[in-house]
Image (cartoon, rainbow, N blue to C red):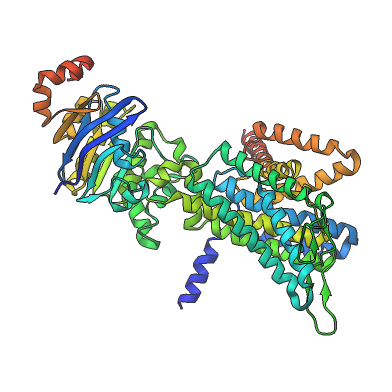
Amino acid sequence: MPSHSSLGSALRLLEGPQTLGKGPAFWSGFVVVLALACIYPLFADGYDVGNNVYFFNWAFMALGLSLIWGYGGALSFGQTAFFGVAGYAYGVLTINFGDAYGFTFVSLVLATLIAALFAAVLGYFLFFGRISGVFLGIVTLSVTLVLERFMSQTAGPEWHIGSARLNGFNGMGNMPSLTIPWPGGDVVLYPDVPLYYLTLALLVLVYLALRMVVNSRFGNVLVAIRENPQRAEMLGYDIRRYQLGGFVVGSALAGLSGVLYTAWGNYITPSSMGMTQAALPIVWVAVGGRSDLTTTLLGTLLVLAGFQALTIYGSQYALVAMGFLLVVTVPAAPSGIIIGIGSLFSRGLKRRKAREAR
Amino acid sequence: MAILQTRGLDKWFGGLHVTDNVDFSMQPGEVHCLIGPNGAGKSTFFRLVLGEHLPNGGAILYDGADITRAKSYQRIRRGISVKFQVPGIFKALKVRQNLQIALQDHLSGHSLNEEIDRLLEFLKLKDAAGQLAGSLSHGQKQWLEIGMAIALKPKLLLLDEPTAGMTPDETHATGEMVQALNADGVSVLAVEHDMAFVRQIAQRVTVLHFGRVFAQGTIDEIVADERVAAIYLGETGHA
């Protein structure tokens, strides 16, 4: 049956030249990690579970940046722009229209689409204007900083959309959490167990879907553009369309992060689009290993957890430590710490085997 | 009808007239070499044909159609293909995947794999299929790029100094590849410095000098032309 074969060929894309990890060993490991993640809330307290949701929230933006930068070779320094736009959009929508009848999920989708539309418009001018390299970083960073500045001066009562006050530097708050409509009382996904499972499920879905995307024909062209844009164009590909496609998908994921974060904390501020926040995704993705989805995901979660531990004990020094980590990782392990540690480990194994052989 | 023709092609870079009223024409099935001293405007002419530069005046016709303002990828889709001087390959990807990316818009599944195998054989890269393209020798990189260029089944293949940096053996093997392609009906336009290679492949030669067409003819006519020897062949001593 054709539907079977097309499903089969889609599933085959879960493994391919653009993703690390294949075969039964990898997927067994994947299932074990997923199973551990699923039983984790049974053993952890509510605070830690909520904390993990917070980490997961950022992972979407990191995966999106991996697609744009690691696979597509276009360093966007302003993914937080889409994070912020989607976060504010979720706030405006839900504050105005409430949370009944599952509207929070409709808002989630709409806000993510608004971020994607914004990325499509911005990306059109960037890629069809042939802006690349460091200039792409400068323009995208400028966009997020302009948005931060703009939102910071919306403190006055005249700045509102419907009944949603923008609140300037203090940020917008009191938007509802994600809510599942249920007979006999809606289920509100506060930052604990139910929200944890929802976010985890979304993360697994997005991770698997992205694996299929990067191993598809589209993904092949994306890495070809990263490697040699001129050659890719001279194979007959309109590279601007592919770059734009990757940018829109990656930025929609930044938007999804923004919505989840806003719904998780019932809060979004202009500083979420500021300089520090714009730089952090670059650190997570570069340190983890930007050119692979798995290393990006693991690296991001690790660095976030480490960053939070540092923040608790060292407050502002945590940021300095992040900068230091980036400066050390880039020359020492250009493809990220996960691959760096992996190759160190396999070299050690080889040496041991060689010694045993002697 | 000419496979490629330019009429009064003009290109200025600031005050520099790098392509000066060039009328050029080559017939289908022809192997045509473009030669000239450094700075003669060969590369600019090449880039104009590819659409990497747009001309200030004149027209470019491919297979009878005006492509003067067409985007590069549109020209490629019409049947032009190119191999650059510096090997333009995807270094961090495997050799096989390089060819796959070139072919994936035209073929899929089993026939895609068969065509990749056929190309690997033709390019003498069968044993290197699983290597990263960046780890190939210089000559092999050049061949891989030729492979990517011909994977598109072009009607017109543009070669920019295809033998640059190759050993004499590799140069000769490249010449044989070009002849084999030409026997299959592919028209070839090559910019080349190596006169031995030009002799091996060229049916007609155009000499550019200061952005203008200086002489045109068969290789023997060009070699016999004392004016050409004075500006170019005499200087390099290759002829």
Residue B18: x and y in percent read 29, 28
Residue at x-position 29% and y-position 36%: B46
Residue B171: x and y in percent read 27, 31
Q: Is residue B94 left or right of residue A195?
A: left
Residue B129: x and y in percent read 41, 45
For the C terminus of chain A, the image quarter is top right
Residue at x-position 23% and y-position 48%: B62
Q: Work out which residue is located at the far bottom of the displayed protein and give it.
A: A183
Above-or-below relation of A326 to A50: above
Count every numbered label the image shows and give the total: 0
Whether residue B120 is visible? yes
Above-or-below relation of A227 to A301: above
Above-or-below relation of B7 to A247: above
Residue closest to the eye, A284 or A150: A150
Residue at x-position 88% and y-position 60%: A44
Above-or-below relation of A309 to A321: below
Whether residue B162 is visible? no
